[in-house]
Image: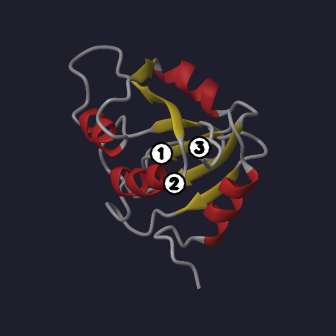
Amino acid sequence: MLKTELLHPEILSALAMAGHGSKVLIADSNYPFTTGSAADAEIVFLNFAPGKLNAVEVLEVIARAIPVEAAEVMVPDEGPEPSIFAEFRAALGGEMQIQGRTRFEFYEEARSEDVCLTIATGEQRIYANVLLTIGVVPPAK
């Protein structure tokens, strides 16, 4: 039995095989998982029911399990920033800048060979997709 809060075996396996520069996609329920994911990425379906599990809940646990170097989001062509972006920032510690990408730029990044894991959530809010770049674990002192 594990002592960590992250218990999902497929997610743990994918993260254990990832390294610095690998990417993790956490996507809302509208995301095109089969056509919008990297060919070799592990796809894990956590979209149990609408709203279960949501993208922020998944991000909070993933962000405590890995060092996050960068985060990217899909931004609308016009209008205000989606409110979920503030929740993403809070889940990432509040100080991390998130880079916005247009819909098709985001899809291109999410299909990159650097993406090792795609997590499907039951998130109902739109533009609730976040692409994380894994950072470095510093050596023990």
Residue 75, how many percent across, how many down? 38, 23
| Crowd rating for badge 3 (residues with CA inside 10 Å; few <14, some 14–19, many 20+) | many
Q: Secondary structure at mark 3?
A: strand
Q: Secondary structure at mark 2?
A: strand
Q: What residue would you read off at disc 1?
A: 27
Q: What residue would you read off at disc 2?
A: 120
Residue 17, how many percent across, how many down? 75, 53
Q: Is residue 60 above or below residue 116?
A: below
The residue shown at (55%, 53%) is 119
Q: What residue would you read off at disc 3?
A: 24
Q: Are marks 3 and 2 in contact (CB under 8 Å)?
A: no
Amino acid type of the residue tagged 2 in the rendering = Ala
Residue 125: name its quadrant. top left
Amino acid type of the residue tagged 3 in the rendering = Val
Q: Is residue 5 above or below residue 133?
A: below
Q: Nearer the viewer, mark 3 or mark 2?
A: 3
> In 3D space, how far apart are the residues under numbered discs 3 and 2 (Cα atoms)?
11 Å
Q: Is residue 28 above or below residue 94?
A: below
The residue shown at (34%, 62%) is 50
Total numbered labels placed on residues in the image? 3
> In 3D space, how far apart are the residues under numbered discs 2 and 1 (Cα atoms)?
5 Å
Tell me, what colour scheme is on the image?
Answer: secondary structure
Q: Secondary structure at mark 1?
A: strand
Q: What is the quadrant of the N terminus in the image?
A: bottom right
Q: Are marks 2 and 1 in contact (CB under 8 Å)?
A: yes
Residue 62, how many percent across, how many down? 48, 54
- Residue 40 placement, left or right of 62: right
